[in-house]
């Protein structure tokens, strides 16, 4: 970067940092009308210096079919992980009970030394750490299944271990996130379309390093077993939304949001921007199909990161009348 350009950008950022204000805009008020929303105010020269660009969202519809690659999982691995978790929880319970017993004896002076109490505390801490580790591993590997109520979860586990059902991991190559879950799944087994039930999104990535779903397959064809790789088609309900490029979307602890250019007021020499929360529906091309903005909104599609660096604002849901 040329020296004079760097100086100009630095001066623009310094000037903009003093332009962060908290106001309530009548034309773009949030859902909570009593809560003020921080806004960034930029002059034309400042916008040009940092490369701010706005555009209006484009109405679009998602495709109804998504191609994925399925891997039939080994149910004995699930059985092993659940067994380790149960054993670790039992060990933690036993260690906690022993600690309570030793502490009571120590407090009563009835034959328990400080060394015995410290040893019991160490054993309980070790057992607790082991229980937490196995629980976390189980949630990481089998999250959608573990999230089921105990009755349905045990039913799926028994059917998978006995071979009456299969658990399949369906990877979507090239994607690292997924909006709404698809409605149905179809496995292509030698030209036969085998339906599957989508349990949820898996947290652990595979060699494909892509987002994946856990599927439950009932009445699978004979011969299809652990380790088999089959094509999977995910069927989604056709979704309508507004298309935004990925550079327009930011993310924080409250979810996804974009920066919206507010309506200019008479005599105002600066342009104001406010963060608006959006709902991510599904990845689409080089962008995302979203809900939460209107097709006549001017959204910052380049330079949103600059606005984020200038303010740590909380996002608000837009009002229907914006």
Image (cartoon, rainbow, N blue to C red):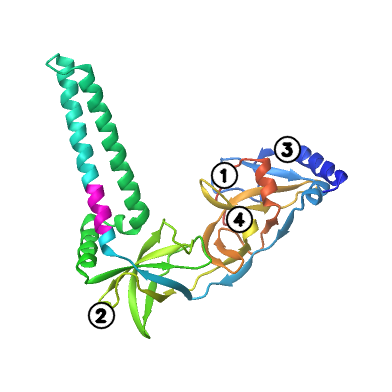
The tag on residue 17 is 3
Magenta stretch: includes residue 82: yes
Which label's residue is closer to the chain start, 3 or 1?
3
Q: Residue 256: image x %, image y %?
A: 55, 53
In the rendered view, tell whether residue 296 sits above or below residue 127.
below
Q: Nearer the viewer, mark 4 or mark 2?
A: 2
Callouts 1 and 2 close, C-beta under 8 Å: no
Q: Which residue is mark 4?
A: 249
Q: Kindly report the distance in space between the C-alpha atoms of the residues bearing marks 2 and 3.
A: 66 Å
User: Which is more foreground, mark 3 or mark 1?
Assistant: 3
Question: Mark 1 or 2 closer to N-term?
Answer: 1
Using a 10 Å C-alpha cutoff, classify the residue at mark 1 as few (fewer than 14 neighbours), some (14 to 19) or many (20 or more).
few
> Mark 4: few, some, or many residues within 10 Å (few <14, many ≥20)?
many
Whole-number angstrom distance, CA of label 3 to CA of label 4: 21 Å
Q: Is residue 27 above or below residue 66?
A: above
Whichever of labels 1 and 4 marks the residue nearer the N terminus, that label is 1
Q: Horizontal and vertical percent for residue 14?
A: 77, 37
In this orientation, which residue lies closer to the viewer: 208 or 153? 208
Name the outermost residue toward the bottom: 191
**Residue on which disc 2 sits:** 222
Which of 95 and 293 lies nearest the eye of the viewer? 95
Q: Is residue 10 left or right of residue 284?
A: right
Q: Which residue is mark 1?
A: 33
Location of the C terminus (image quadrant): bottom right
Which label lies toward us, 1 or 2?
2
Residue 76 within the segment the image draws in magenta: no
């Amino acid at each position: 970067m040329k020296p004079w350009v760097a100086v100009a950008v630095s001066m623009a950022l310094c000037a903009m940092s003093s332009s962060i204000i908290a106001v309530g805009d009548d034309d773009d008020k949030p859902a909570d009308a009593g809560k003020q929303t921080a806004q960034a105010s930029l002059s034309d020269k400042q916008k040009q210096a940092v490369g701010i660009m706005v555009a209006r969202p484009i109405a679009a519809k998602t495709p109804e079919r998504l191609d994925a690659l399925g891997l039939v999982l080994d149910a004995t691995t699930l059985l092993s992980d659940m067994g380790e978790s149960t054993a670790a929880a039992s060990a933690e319970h036993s260690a906690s009970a022993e600690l309570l017993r030793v502490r009571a004896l120590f407090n009563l002076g009835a034959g328990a030394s400080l060394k015995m109490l410290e040893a019991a505390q160490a054993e309980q801490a070790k057992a607790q750490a082991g229980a937490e580790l196995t629980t976390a591993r189980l949630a990481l590997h089998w999250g959608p299944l573990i999230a089921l109520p105990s009755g349905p979860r045990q039913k799926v586990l028994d059917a998978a271990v006995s071979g009456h059902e299969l658990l399949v991991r369906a990877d979507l190559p090239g994607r690292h996130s997924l909006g709404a879950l698809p409605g149905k799944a179809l496995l292509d087994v030698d030209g036969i379309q085998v339906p599957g039930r989508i349990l949820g999104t898996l947290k652990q990535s595979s060699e494909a390093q892509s987002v994946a779903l856990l599927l439950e397959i009932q009445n699978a064809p004979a011969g299809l077993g652990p380790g088999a790789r089959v094509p999977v088609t995910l069927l989604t309900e056709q979704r309508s939304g507004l298309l935004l490029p990925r550079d327009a979307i930011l993310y924080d602890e409250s979810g996804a949001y974009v920066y919206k250019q507010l309506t200019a007021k008479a005599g105002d020499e600066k342009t104001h921007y406010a963060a608006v929360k959006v709902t991510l529906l599904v990845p689409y091309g080089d962008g995302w199909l979203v809900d939460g903005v209107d097709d006549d909104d001017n959204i910052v599609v380049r330079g949103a990161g600059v606005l984020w660096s200038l303010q740590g604002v909380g996002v608000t849901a837009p009002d229907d009348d914006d």
